[in-house]
Image: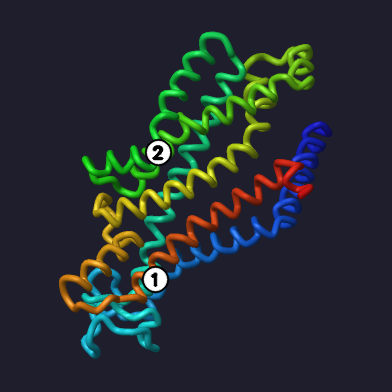
Amino acid sequence: MRLVIERIRARRRSIRRSLRAVWGSPTAVVGLGLILLFGVAALIHPLLLRTVWPAKIYDPLVGFDFTMMHPADPSSAHLLGTDALGRDVLSMILAASRPAWVVALTAAITTGVIATFIGALGAFYRGWVDGVLSHVSDAFLLLPAPIFVLIIAEQVELSPVRFGLVFGLINGLGAGAIVMRSQGLKVMAEPFIEAARVAGGGGLHILVRHLVPHLLPLAALYMMLSVVGAIVAHGFAAFLGQTESLVSWGAIVFFGITSARSFSGVVPWSALVSASAALSLFAGAFYLVSSGLREILDPRLRAR
Protein backbone atom coordinates (compact mmCIF):
# COMPACT_ATOMS: atom_id res chain seq x y z
CA MET A 1 0.00 0.00 0.00
CA ARG A 2 2.83 2.37 0.89
CA LEU A 3 4.53 1.62 -2.44
CA VAL A 4 1.34 2.49 -4.33
CA ILE A 5 1.02 5.78 -2.44
CA GLU A 6 4.64 6.66 -3.20
CA ARG A 7 4.10 5.96 -6.89
CA ILE A 8 1.01 8.19 -6.93
CA ARG A 9 2.93 10.99 -5.22
CA ALA A 10 5.82 10.63 -7.65
CA ARG A 11 3.41 10.78 -10.58
CA ARG A 12 1.82 13.93 -9.17
CA ARG A 13 5.22 15.57 -8.72
CA SER A 14 6.11 14.69 -12.31
CA ILE A 15 2.85 16.21 -13.56
CA ARG A 16 3.47 19.40 -11.55
CA ARG A 17 6.98 19.73 -12.97
CA SER A 18 5.65 19.27 -16.50
CA LEU A 19 2.95 21.90 -15.98
CA ARG A 20 5.46 24.38 -14.55
CA ALA A 21 7.72 23.78 -17.54
CA VAL A 22 4.85 24.41 -19.97
CA TRP A 23 3.72 27.57 -18.19
CA GLY A 24 7.33 28.73 -18.19
CA SER A 25 7.38 28.74 -21.99
CA PRO A 26 5.71 31.89 -23.41
CA THR A 27 5.50 30.23 -26.83
CA ALA A 28 3.55 27.27 -25.47
CA VAL A 29 1.28 29.52 -23.40
CA VAL A 30 0.33 31.62 -26.43
CA GLY A 31 -0.36 28.46 -28.43
CA LEU A 32 -2.49 26.98 -25.66
CA GLY A 33 -4.41 30.24 -25.40
CA LEU A 34 -5.24 30.16 -29.11
CA ILE A 35 -6.24 26.49 -28.88
CA LEU A 36 -8.56 27.33 -25.98
CA LEU A 37 -10.06 30.18 -28.02
CA PHE A 38 -10.85 27.86 -30.93
CA GLY A 39 -12.25 25.29 -28.51
CA VAL A 40 -14.65 27.91 -27.15
CA ALA A 41 -15.58 28.88 -30.73
CA ALA A 42 -16.51 25.30 -31.58
CA LEU A 43 -18.63 24.93 -28.44
CA ILE A 44 -20.33 28.32 -28.44
CA HIS A 45 -21.65 28.30 -32.02
CA PRO A 46 -24.50 25.78 -31.46
CA LEU A 47 -25.47 27.68 -28.29
CA LEU A 48 -25.63 30.98 -30.17
CA LEU A 49 -27.91 29.46 -32.80
CA ARG A 50 -30.24 28.12 -30.11
CA THR A 51 -30.37 31.25 -27.97
CA VAL A 52 -29.21 34.54 -29.54
CA TRP A 53 -29.01 34.11 -33.31
CA PRO A 54 -32.17 33.37 -35.34
CA ALA A 55 -31.35 30.26 -37.38
CA LYS A 56 -33.08 31.61 -40.49
CA ILE A 57 -30.54 34.45 -40.59
CA TYR A 58 -27.41 32.99 -39.00
CA ASP A 59 -27.49 29.38 -40.14
CA PRO A 60 -24.02 28.83 -41.69
CA LEU A 61 -25.48 26.95 -44.68
CA VAL A 62 -28.88 28.44 -45.53
CA GLY A 63 -29.13 31.59 -43.41
CA PHE A 64 -30.15 34.81 -45.20
CA ASP A 65 -30.80 38.35 -44.01
CA PHE A 66 -33.51 39.98 -46.14
CA THR A 67 -32.92 43.43 -44.66
CA MET A 68 -29.73 44.21 -46.62
CA MET A 69 -27.89 43.69 -49.86
CA HIS A 70 -25.21 41.03 -50.04
CA PRO A 71 -22.31 40.69 -49.68
CA ALA A 72 -22.54 43.17 -46.82
CA ASP A 73 -19.75 44.89 -44.93
CA PRO A 74 -19.24 44.25 -41.21
CA SER A 75 -21.96 45.80 -39.05
CA SER A 76 -23.54 45.45 -35.63
CA ALA A 77 -25.89 42.77 -36.98
CA HIS A 78 -23.12 40.89 -38.80
CA LEU A 79 -19.77 41.51 -37.14
CA LEU A 80 -17.79 40.07 -40.06
CA GLY A 81 -20.32 40.91 -42.76
CA THR A 82 -22.07 38.46 -45.10
CA ASP A 83 -21.08 36.60 -48.25
CA ALA A 84 -22.73 36.74 -51.69
CA LEU A 85 -25.44 34.26 -50.59
CA GLY A 86 -26.34 36.33 -47.54
CA ARG A 87 -24.77 33.98 -45.00
CA ASP A 88 -23.24 35.46 -41.86
CA VAL A 89 -19.46 35.17 -42.11
CA LEU A 90 -18.87 34.94 -38.35
CA SER A 91 -21.36 32.08 -38.09
CA MET A 92 -19.57 30.24 -40.91
CA ILE A 93 -16.15 30.82 -39.31
CA LEU A 94 -17.37 29.43 -35.98
CA ALA A 95 -19.10 26.47 -37.62
CA ALA A 96 -15.96 25.64 -39.62
CA SER A 97 -13.98 25.24 -36.41
CA ARG A 98 -15.79 21.97 -35.62
CA PRO A 99 -14.60 19.92 -38.63
CA ALA A 100 -11.16 21.47 -38.13
CA TRP A 101 -11.13 20.15 -34.58
CA VAL A 102 -12.19 16.69 -35.76
CA VAL A 103 -9.35 16.62 -38.29
CA ALA A 104 -6.85 17.86 -35.69
CA LEU A 105 -7.77 15.38 -32.96
CA THR A 106 -8.04 12.42 -35.32
CA ALA A 107 -4.70 13.15 -36.98
CA ALA A 108 -2.97 13.73 -33.63
CA ILE A 109 -4.24 10.53 -32.00
CA THR A 110 -3.58 8.40 -35.08
CA THR A 111 -0.07 9.76 -35.52
CA GLY A 112 0.83 9.42 -31.85
CA VAL A 113 -0.46 5.87 -31.43
CA ILE A 114 1.02 4.47 -34.64
CA ALA A 115 4.39 6.24 -34.37
CA THR A 116 4.84 5.24 -30.72
CA PHE A 117 3.77 1.64 -31.35
CA ILE A 118 5.98 1.10 -34.40
CA GLY A 119 8.95 2.99 -32.96
CA ALA A 120 8.81 1.16 -29.62
CA LEU A 121 8.55 -2.27 -31.23
CA GLY A 122 11.49 -1.62 -33.54
CA ALA A 123 13.70 -0.23 -30.77
CA PHE A 124 12.86 -3.02 -28.32
CA TYR A 125 13.00 -6.15 -30.48
CA ARG A 126 15.66 -5.05 -32.99
CA GLY A 127 16.71 -7.81 -35.43
CA TRP A 128 14.36 -8.75 -38.25
CA VAL A 129 11.40 -7.02 -36.58
CA ASP A 130 13.25 -3.72 -36.60
CA GLY A 131 14.40 -4.35 -40.17
CA VAL A 132 10.88 -4.93 -41.49
CA LEU A 133 9.42 -1.95 -39.64
CA SER A 134 12.28 0.29 -40.76
CA HIS A 135 11.71 -0.63 -44.41
CA VAL A 136 7.98 0.10 -44.02
CA SER A 137 8.76 3.48 -42.45
CA ASP A 138 11.27 4.31 -45.19
CA ALA A 139 8.62 3.54 -47.82
CA PHE A 140 6.03 5.80 -46.17
CA LEU A 141 8.65 8.50 -45.68
CA LEU A 142 8.75 8.85 -49.46
CA LEU A 143 5.00 9.65 -49.44
CA PRO A 144 4.52 13.25 -48.24
CA ALA A 145 1.36 13.03 -46.15
CA PRO A 146 -0.22 16.33 -47.33
CA ILE A 147 0.23 15.53 -51.02
CA PHE A 148 -0.79 11.88 -50.68
CA VAL A 149 -3.96 12.66 -48.75
CA LEU A 150 -4.91 15.28 -51.36
CA ILE A 151 -4.49 12.64 -54.07
CA ILE A 152 -6.78 10.28 -52.14
CA ALA A 153 -9.30 13.08 -51.57
CA GLU A 154 -9.37 13.68 -55.32
CA GLN A 155 -10.63 10.11 -55.83
CA VAL A 156 -12.80 9.71 -52.72
CA GLU A 157 -14.46 12.46 -50.71
CA LEU A 158 -13.09 12.30 -47.19
CA SER A 159 -15.03 13.20 -44.07
CA PRO A 160 -13.05 15.04 -41.37
CA VAL A 161 -12.56 11.77 -39.47
CA ARG A 162 -11.33 9.84 -42.51
CA PHE A 163 -9.13 12.76 -43.54
CA GLY A 164 -7.46 12.82 -40.14
CA LEU A 165 -7.08 9.03 -40.10
CA VAL A 166 -5.41 8.91 -43.52
CA PHE A 167 -3.09 11.80 -42.71
CA GLY A 168 -2.18 10.39 -39.31
CA LEU A 169 -1.62 6.91 -40.73
CA ILE A 170 0.84 8.12 -43.37
CA ASN A 171 2.58 10.51 -40.98
CA GLY A 172 2.78 7.96 -38.18
CA LEU A 173 4.09 5.12 -40.31
CA GLY A 174 6.69 7.35 -41.97
CA ALA A 175 8.61 10.13 -40.26
CA GLY A 176 6.85 9.65 -36.92
CA ALA A 177 7.91 6.02 -36.56
CA ILE A 178 11.49 6.83 -37.57
CA VAL A 179 11.77 9.60 -34.97
CA MET A 180 10.23 7.45 -32.23
CA ARG A 181 12.50 4.50 -33.07
CA SER A 182 15.56 6.73 -32.80
CA GLN A 183 14.46 7.95 -29.39
CA GLY A 184 13.57 4.40 -28.38
CA LEU A 185 17.08 3.18 -29.16
CA LYS A 186 18.49 5.87 -26.85
CA VAL A 187 16.13 4.80 -24.07
CA MET A 188 17.01 1.11 -24.51
CA ALA A 189 20.68 1.98 -23.94
CA GLU A 190 19.93 3.54 -20.53
CA PRO A 191 21.08 1.68 -17.38
CA PHE A 192 17.57 1.45 -15.91
CA ILE A 193 16.50 -0.83 -18.77
CA GLU A 194 19.23 -3.33 -17.88
CA ALA A 195 18.34 -2.93 -14.21
CA ALA A 196 14.73 -3.80 -15.02
CA ARG A 197 15.89 -6.95 -16.84
CA VAL A 198 18.11 -7.98 -13.92
CA ALA A 199 15.20 -7.43 -11.54
CA GLY A 200 13.21 -10.00 -13.50
CA GLY A 201 11.10 -7.71 -15.64
CA GLY A 202 9.68 -9.43 -18.70
CA GLY A 203 9.71 -8.05 -22.22
CA LEU A 204 6.15 -6.72 -22.08
CA HIS A 205 6.77 -5.15 -18.67
CA ILE A 206 9.88 -3.31 -19.88
CA LEU A 207 8.18 -2.26 -23.11
CA VAL A 208 5.04 -0.88 -21.46
CA ARG A 209 6.35 0.40 -18.11
CA HIS A 210 9.82 1.67 -19.03
CA LEU A 211 10.19 2.26 -22.78
CA VAL A 212 6.84 3.69 -23.89
CA PRO A 213 6.51 6.25 -21.03
CA HIS A 214 9.85 7.77 -22.05
CA LEU A 215 8.60 8.14 -25.63
CA LEU A 216 5.39 9.97 -24.74
CA PRO A 217 6.85 13.52 -24.48
CA LEU A 218 8.36 13.23 -27.95
CA ALA A 219 5.13 11.65 -29.19
CA ALA A 220 3.20 14.68 -27.91
CA LEU A 221 5.57 16.97 -29.79
CA TYR A 222 5.16 15.05 -33.01
CA MET A 223 1.37 14.94 -32.58
CA MET A 224 1.31 18.74 -32.51
CA LEU A 225 3.37 18.93 -35.69
CA SER A 226 1.07 16.39 -37.35
CA VAL A 227 -1.94 18.59 -36.55
CA VAL A 228 -0.29 21.55 -38.29
CA GLY A 229 0.15 19.57 -41.50
CA ALA A 230 -3.32 18.03 -41.30
CA ILE A 231 -5.08 21.37 -40.83
CA VAL A 232 -3.25 23.02 -43.71
CA ALA A 233 -3.83 20.01 -45.98
CA HIS A 234 -7.53 19.95 -45.06
CA GLY A 235 -7.79 23.65 -45.86
CA PHE A 236 -6.35 23.06 -49.34
CA ALA A 237 -8.60 20.03 -49.88
CA ALA A 238 -11.67 22.03 -48.87
CA PHE A 239 -10.62 24.89 -51.14
CA LEU A 240 -10.47 22.39 -54.02
CA GLY A 241 -13.84 20.88 -53.06
CA GLN A 242 -12.36 17.50 -52.12
CA THR A 243 -13.90 17.08 -48.67
CA GLU A 244 -17.36 16.29 -47.32
CA SER A 245 -17.31 19.34 -45.03
CA LEU A 246 -20.00 21.71 -46.24
CA VAL A 247 -18.65 24.53 -44.08
CA SER A 248 -14.88 24.83 -43.73
CA TRP A 249 -12.36 27.64 -43.87
CA GLY A 250 -10.94 26.50 -47.20
CA ALA A 251 -14.44 26.32 -48.71
CA ILE A 252 -15.23 29.83 -47.44
CA VAL A 253 -12.16 31.20 -49.20
CA PHE A 254 -13.01 29.35 -52.41
CA PHE A 255 -16.60 30.59 -52.46
CA GLY A 256 -15.49 34.13 -51.70
CA ILE A 257 -13.21 34.14 -54.75
CA THR A 258 -15.66 32.44 -57.12
CA SER A 259 -18.65 34.53 -56.02
CA ALA A 260 -16.75 37.73 -56.77
CA ARG A 261 -16.17 36.47 -60.31
CA SER A 262 -19.57 34.89 -60.94
CA PHE A 263 -22.24 36.72 -58.96
CA SER A 264 -21.78 40.14 -57.46
CA GLY A 265 -18.37 41.17 -58.72
CA VAL A 266 -17.69 42.43 -55.20
CA VAL A 267 -14.87 40.71 -53.32
CA PRO A 268 -16.05 39.72 -49.80
CA TRP A 269 -12.81 40.68 -48.12
CA SER A 270 -14.15 40.04 -44.62
CA ALA A 271 -14.88 36.40 -45.51
CA LEU A 272 -11.56 35.87 -47.28
CA VAL A 273 -9.43 37.48 -44.58
CA SER A 274 -11.26 35.98 -41.59
CA ALA A 275 -11.30 32.43 -43.00
CA SER A 276 -7.63 32.62 -43.96
CA ALA A 277 -6.72 34.07 -40.58
CA ALA A 278 -8.71 31.39 -38.73
CA LEU A 279 -6.97 28.58 -40.61
CA SER A 280 -3.54 30.13 -40.10
CA LEU A 281 -4.09 30.85 -36.41
CA PHE A 282 -5.47 27.38 -35.70
CA ALA A 283 -2.54 25.66 -37.38
CA GLY A 284 -0.13 28.18 -35.90
CA ALA A 285 -1.44 27.52 -32.39
CA PHE A 286 -0.39 23.88 -32.54
CA TYR A 287 2.94 24.88 -34.05
CA LEU A 288 3.56 27.26 -31.13
CA VAL A 289 2.76 24.49 -28.66
CA SER A 290 5.12 22.13 -30.48
CA SER A 291 7.82 24.80 -30.44
CA GLY A 292 7.32 25.26 -26.71
CA LEU A 293 7.50 21.50 -26.12
CA ARG A 294 10.68 21.35 -28.17
CA GLU A 295 12.23 24.02 -25.94
CA ILE A 296 11.21 22.05 -22.86
CA LEU A 297 12.53 18.72 -24.13
CA ASP A 298 15.81 20.09 -25.52
CA PRO A 299 18.01 21.76 -22.87
CA ARG A 300 20.14 23.36 -25.60
CA LEU A 301 17.14 25.35 -26.84
CA ARG A 302 16.28 26.45 -23.31
CA ALA A 303 19.83 27.73 -22.88
CA ARG A 304 19.35 30.10 -25.82
Give the x, y percent position of residue 36: 55, 62
For this orientation, the residue located farthest to the left is 262
Dot label at residue 4: none
Of the pair 188 and 174, the residue shown nearer to us: 174
Residue position marked by numbered label 1 in the rendering: 273
Q: Horizontally, is 197 left or right of 74 in the view?
A: right
Q: Amino acid at mark 2?
A: Ala
Is residue 193 shown above or below 149? above
Q: Horizontally, is 221 left or right of 170 in the view?
A: right
Of the pair 270 and 102, the residue shown nearer to us: 270
Image point 63% across, 22% down: which residue?
207
Image point 75% across, 18% down: which residue?
196
Is residue 172 shown above or below 184? below
Can the viewer see residue 63 in this picture?
yes
Helix, strand or loop at disc 2?
A: helix
Give the x, y percent position of residue 201: 71, 16
Instruction: State the quadrant of the N terminus.
Output: top right
Image point 26% across, 59% down: which residue?
246
Helix, strand or loop at disc 1?
A: helix
Q: Horizontally, is 229 left or right of 247 in the view?
A: right
Q: Amino acid at mark 1?
A: Val
Residue position marked by numbered label 2 in the rendering: 145
Q: CA distance from mark 2 to mark 1?
A: 27 Å
Q: Neighbour class for label 2 at 10 Å: few (<14), some, many (≥20)?
A: many
Give the x, y percent position of residue 181: 58, 25
> Which of marks 1 and 2 precedes in the sequence?
2
For this orientation, the residue located farthest to the top is 128
Is residue 218 shown above or below 281? above
Give the x, y percent position of residue 104: 45, 50
